[in-house]
Amino acid sequence: MSARLDAQMAFLREADKLKQVVRGTTLCDASRYENSGEHSWHIALYAMVLGEDAPAGVDTARVIRMLLLHDLVEIDAGDAPIFGDHDAAGMAEKERAAADRIFGLLPEGQARAFRALWEEFEAAVSPDARFAKSLDRFQPPNQNLASDGGSWVDYDTRFPTFEARVGEKIKRGAPWLWAWLEPKARAWFKARGKLG
């Protein structure tokens, strides 16, 4: 029992490092950039609040678990802002190596289960993962709207890019959330001459 608890505590101490990973999105009040630990907590809360309207068959408890785990790989790989330029294949390789190391700290059964949830989220094929991925894409634009642009301003984003990189993922797992968000985002981009 002691060795198992030692391994679990090593994982939990390592997970604390997620609070040091700064993301490209500000807090709603634009006072500072959020960290990945805050983001993971916030989208888990999004799942609790919005999960009652999730598509049939979605297990909100599983979605919450995915969302709490999904960014742990950023401890090693760093954040890849959605509107930034980065090597997607290179980042995916860094994230897989990070998953090996970080989930590998856990006792074997937990390591397999947590890694499987992370892999499921990344693949975004199951209903749970599609909904989780939608929430992961839905939270940042709401923060950007609240902070008068946030990362959209930082990355000089135009609406077609936003729709392609964010809207498509939200529509795939939570079309009603995109229907709510799209006119608000479109109005923001239109007011700044960035619709096209």
Image (tube, rainbow, N blue to C red):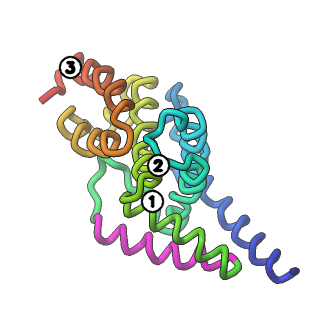
Residue wearing tag 2: 132
Please report the residue visible at 33 percent of the width from the left and 37 percent of the height from the top: 154
Q: Secondary structure at mark 2?
A: helix
Residue wearing tag 1: 121
Q: Tell me the amino acid under the disc marked 3.
A: Lys
**Depth order, front residue of 55/161:** 55
Q: Against 177, is 4 above or below?
A: below
The kind of secondary structure the magenta stretch mainly shows is: helix
**CA distance for labels 2 and 3:** 29 Å
- The answer to whether the residues at label 2 and label 1 have Cβ atoms under 8 Å apart is yes
Q: Secondary structure at mark 1?
A: helix
Q: In the image, residue 106 lies at what x, y percent?
A: 68, 76
Q: In the image, residue 112 lies at what x, y percent?
A: 59, 76
Please report the residue visible at 43 percent of the width from the left and 41 percent of the height from the top: 55
**CA distance for labels 2 and 1:** 7 Å
Residue wearing tag 3: 190
**Depth order, front residue of 11/87:** 11
- The answer to whether the residues at label 2 and label 3 have Cβ atoms under 8 Å apart is no
Q: Tell me the amino acid under the disc marked 2.
A: Ala
Q: Magenta residues? A: 88-106
| Residue reaching furthest to the right | 2
Can residue 61 be seen at all in this image of the molecule? Answer: yes
